[in-house]
Image (tube, helix red, strand yellow):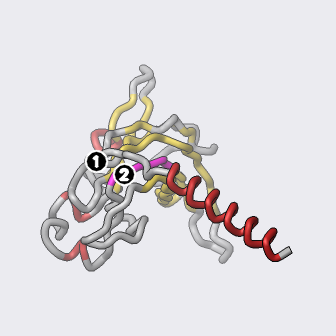
Amino acid sequence: MKRFRLLLAGTVGLLTLGLGSCLKAPNYPVTPEISVDDTSVVLRHYASGGTQPIDSVFITIRFQDGDGDLGLSSAESAVSPYAYPSRFNNNYFIEPYIKQPNGTFVPLTSLMPARTVAGAYNSRFEHIATTSENHSAPIKGTLTRVYAFAYQSLYRPGEEARFQISIADRALHESNTVITNSVVFPK
């Protein structure tokens, strides 16, 4: 019986080593790559009486990065090269587009220059993976951001919009740019 246990333990150990050596870390480029996963619009009302309802657009993107340096902390965003007014004070870049009667999509900033400016909807996301200066590893996953605004403040009911998205890593590598599927704001 003792010999059987020893043989079983040895077999399991060899299998574990054998399978572990077959697994290799993915080889992604150090420049982040993204793709659109999902886009949806939700009309939300706050529970307390009398408050204005909020429209929210939920945008989910898939990402992969070869060295895992995605995300920016508040402390990092206060120093160069990320400090304001640098474009990289944010790392999630979003540009809304509105569908026109002729079927083309135009940037919201060109339609409402007095109410919105380029980059107004950019934001920052925190570190996605735990990496240090001495260690980096490829990462892959999804990132969901919520773009919220007062009901009908920017978009009219029934209006169709889509969003242009890109992200940047801490080495200032900017990803490819993607455009979400269209969403229609509730009536």
The amino acid on which the numbered mark 1 sits, given as a three-letter code, is Thr
Location of residue 48 (image quadrant): bottom right
Between residue 91 and residue 67, name the one nearer to us: 67
Location of the N terminus (image quadrant): bottom right
Q: Residue furthest front?
A: 3
Residue linked to disc 1: 31
Choose between 141 and 149: the one closer to the eye. Answer: 141
x and y percent of residue 155 in the render?
Answer: 48, 46
Q: Position of residue 178 (x, y in %)?
A: 39, 38
Nearer to us in this view, 59 or 131: 131
Residue positioned 64% across, 57% down in the render? 15
Secondary-structure class at tag 2: strand
What range of the chain is rendered magenta?
Answer: 60-66
Q: Name above or below for residue 117 compared with residue 81.
A: above
Q: Quadrant of the C terminus?
A: top right
Which amino acid is tagged 2?
Answer: Asp
- 42 relative position to 113: left or right: right
Let me know if residue 153 is in the magenta part: no
> How far apart are the two marked residues, 2 and 1, measured between alpha carbons?
6 Å
Q: Is 63 contained in the magenta span? A: yes
Earlier in the chain: of badge 2 and badge 1, it is 1
Q: Kindly state the secondary structure of the residue where label 1 is placed.
A: loop
Q: Which residue is mark 2?
A: 65
Residue 167 relative to residue 141: left or right: left
The answer to whether 125 is drawn above or below residue 63 in the figure is below
The label number, if any, that marks residue 84 in the structure image? none
Q: Are marks 2 and 1 in contact (CB under 8 Å)?
A: yes
Q: Relative to 63, is 42 on the left or the right?
A: right
